[in-house]
Amino acid sequence: MVMCSETWMRTTQQFSVTLPNEMADAVKSKVAAGEYATESEVIRDGLRVLMARDRAVESWLRGEVADTYDALKADSSQGVSPSQVRARLAAAHGKASAVAKA
């Protein structure tokens, strides 16, 4: 709790969450293994990871993707056709398969 203008304010909120059995079991298992002290800690940590991933995706979209889009919009000759993309992917897949077999 935080004291604000002579009044205590909660810095947390209580929620009721329904999880599929598999997820509920995973949460309980983390606590039982001693990785976390409470189920709430497991959920909080999961949300922190989700929020970090969202920030990383947003940063990537605003940085690399937006810049690439702007460059392509300014000079469409930099773009590649869907058939060129498929050909490049097929070539990369062929190389990766050859390496995996070696």
Image: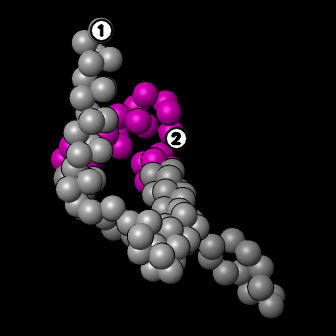
Image quadrant where one finds the N terminus: bottom right
Query: How dense is the environment of label 1, judged by Cα within 10 Å: few (below 14), some, or many (20 and up)?
Result: few
Judge whether residue 7 can be spotted in this image: yes
| Disc sitting over residue 102 in the figure | 1
Q: Does residue 26 sit above or below 86 in this rendering?
A: above
Q: Position of residue 90 (x, y in %)?
A: 22, 39
Q: Give the amino acid at mark 2.
A: Ala
The answer to whether 39 appears left or right of 102 in the picture is right
Give the image's coloring scheme: one colour
The answer to whether 15 appears left or right of 60 in the picture is left
Q: Secondary structure at mark 1?
A: loop
Query: Residue at point 45% right, 52% down?
Result: 46
Q: Give the amino acid at mark 1.
A: Ala
Q: Position of residue 99 (x, y in %)?
A: 32, 17
Judge whether residue 66 can be spotted in this image: no
Question: Are dots 1 and 2 in contact, CB under 8 Å?
Answer: no
Q: Does residue 84 sit above or below 5 in this rendering?
A: above
**How many numbered marks have been drawn onto this rendered protein structure?**
2
N-terminal of the pair, mark 1 or mark 2, is: 2
For the magenta stretch, what is the residue range?
21-44
Q: Which residue is nearer to you in this view: 58 or 79?
A: 79
Residue 34 in the magenta stretch? The answer is yes
Query: Residue at point 41% right, 74% down?
Result: 76
| Disc sitting over residue 37 in the figure | 2
Q: Position of residue 93 (x, y in %)?
A: 26, 33
Query: Residue at point 41% right, 70% down?
Result: 77
Could you tell me what secondary structure mostly forms the magenta stretch? helix
Q: Position of residue 43 (x, y in %)?
A: 43, 54
What's the distance in space between the residues labelled 1 and 2, CA to CA?
47 Å
Q: Which residue is nearer to you in this view: 77 or 61?
A: 77
